[in-house]
Image (tube, rainbow, N blue to C red):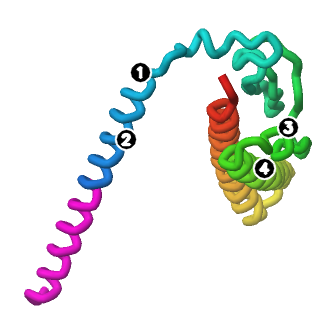
Amino acid sequence: MNSRSFLALSFGVVLIAGAAKADAQVKKNEETASGRAAANSVRSVPEQATDSTHTYAADALRFESSWGNVSIIRGADGPVVGTLGWFRDFDLTQLLASSPPAVADARVFQRDNFRGSLVGSIGATTTLIGVIVAANSSNNAASPVLVIGGVGAMVWGAQHLSMSYSALSRALWWYNRDLKR
């Protein structure tokens, strides 16, 4: 390695480290300023949430999942406002339309959930076909390939389903964050 390359790499590391430190200081200053503003505010959070028609507790969204089905629920014990699941969807972006970051994460959820469901289903079908071919007592080289490929597709699908649930959680967090208290 020549000295110019080493010098350029060293300069890049110093530049990146300095930018990260400056960014951390800016974020710390913003947090302390927002903390002072919150401490100096006239109202406290419980006083702000006393509107009987629209309270945070009644308008906030959450989700519960069971065996691939997701229920979007409003409030602690409120109604189910939508159900998501295997190849089943409702317009989540319309529900979260009041918060642009929530809409962006809802789109990520819809994309990853569809891909994960589709590839996982194809993988399960492929694995089943591979097992049937292997159980048929035929010396076919395709059966292990089908089983391994199907399991791989199911793992890939499960990973994307997991990423979709993370995006859904973020979307609901953004929506709830933007609710008036």
The x and y percentages for residue 80 are 88, 22
Q: In this rendering, is residue 44 above or below 169?
A: above
Which is nearer the N-term, disc 1 or disc 4? 1
Whether residues under marks 3 and 2 lie with C-beta atoms below 8 angstroms apart, the answer is no
Query: Quick one: 124 or 48, which is closer to the camera?
Result: 48
The x and y percentages for residue 165 are 68, 39
Nearest to viewer (mark 1 / mark 3): 1
Amino acid beneath label 1 = Asn
Q: Which residues are magenta?
A: 1-20
Q: CA distance from mark 1 to mark 4?
A: 41 Å
Amino acid beneath label 2 = Glu
Q: In this rendering, is residue 64 above or below 172?
A: above
Which is nearer the N-term, disc 1 or disc 2? 2
Amino acid beneath label 3 = Gly
Disc ID at residue 85: 3
User: Residue at coordinates 75% horizontally, 52% vertically from top-left?
Assistant: 107
Residue 37 seen anywhere in this rendered image of the structure: yes
Disc ID at residue 30: 2
Disc ID at residue 110: 4
Nearest to viewer (mark 1 / mark 4): 1
Please, what is the dominant secondary structure of the magenta stretch?
Answer: helix
Query: Quick one: 88 or 24, which is closer to the camera?
Result: 24
Which is nearer the N-term, disc 1 or disc 3? 1
